[in-house]
Image: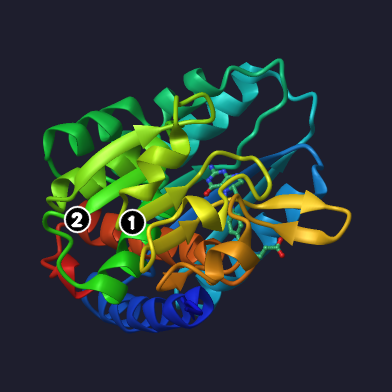
Amino acid sequence: MTARIIDGKAAAADLRARVGDAAAAFEAKAGRKAGLAVVLVGEDPASAVYVRSKGKATVAAGMASFEHRLDADVAEADLLALVDRLNADPAVDGILVQLPLPKHIRESVVIERIVPEKDVDGFHPVNAGRLATGLEGFVPCTPLGCLMLLKTELGDLTGKDAVVIGRSNIVGKPMAALLTRASATVTIAHSRTKDLAGHVARADIVVAAVGIAQFVKGEWLKPGATVIDVGINRTDTGLVGDVDFDSAASVAAAITPVPGGVGPMTIAVLLRNTLVAAYRNADVAFDEDSL
Ligand SMILES: Nc1nc(=O)c2c([nH]1)NC[C@@H]1CN(c3ccc(C(=O)N[C@@H](CCC(=O)O)C(=O)O)cc3)C=[N+]21
């Protein structure tokens, strides 16, 4: 078998176009653009590239982009003061503080300072709790993008066996919560799971978010499985995912490539979350399921 390649770039372009329409409608109703503030601390080149592409995509979707760059040695208190200003700014609907932060700044303190209503990353513990308990909040962009790709690929996920490899707060845990909410049967595994191959062999859906290049082998997969590769690992030969793509593509029914899979969806969902925040914060009615 040779797997279908799930085109994340096309799916992301599709979502961005729908967000663009809804952003224009928001501006007409609210009399202002939806706004996203992105904060970058330091000069990490990869982070700078992401922040630039987020800003471009925000403007292209008809929303306002506010970029704040702080020196790598900025005091934690100064970053918190900026977050306070953004929390209070009515032109800002969403706030994203690019991670990772320099070692001297406590990420958890910064994330908890963002008001949950503007936490479009969905990293605030209040939003994590809302997802876990089925309340309305914000869901982290990468796992929500993965869920959208899975629903497009498979339709209803009820009763499907899913294995999520990786248990981070930003991908693995929220991914498992979303799949559970979608009535899949979910196993959360990780790099030290005993007989990981045995767990993967039973899965209709495999989400790899373990952060180890080409960790998941095609031989582990159930023939016909759907594979979502969240990994972005820079190697001598270029970008590779957490899945050994060539061996997996000969067993799976469908698989996301790296690049061009989950990554572009992450940015499109960030725009989606920002627009949803704008409608909620402006108290303008909106069918969130239309995105
Ligand atoms: N507060 C915060 N929120 C984030 O969402 C966040 C963050 N910090 N820190 C860094 C990670 C990483 N991230 C990516 C976004 C898009 C691509 C993406 O579009 N990738 C393309 C291109 C990859 C490339 O060529 O580098 C692709 O996979 O096709 C990748 C990675 C968001 N992150």
Q: Earlier in the sequence, mark 1 or mark 2?
A: 2
5 on left or right of 75: left
Tell me the quadrant of the picture where the C terminus can be found.
bottom left
Q: Tell me the residue that label 2 is attached to.
A: 160
Q: What residue is at 55 percent from the left and 39 percent from the top?
A: 210
Residue 95 vertical placement versus 222 (above, below): above
Which sits in the foreground, 88 or 48? 48
Q: Which dot marks residue 205?
A: 1
102 to 243, vertically: above or below: above
> Could you say which quadrant of the image residue 280 lies in?
bottom left
Q: Say few, some or many: other residues with alpha carbon within 10 Å of mark 2 (under 14 / 14 to 19 / 20 or more).
A: some
Figure quadrant, ligand 1 = bottom right
Residue flagged by tag 1: what amino acid is it?
Ile
- Neighbour class for label 1 at 10 Å: few (<14), some, many (≥20)? many
Residue shown at 89% from the left, 54% from the top = 236
Asked if 175 appears above or below 248 in the picture, the reply is: above
Rendering coords of residue 142 (x, y %)? 44, 53
Query: Circle 2 sits in a helix, a strand or a loop, which is it?
Result: loop
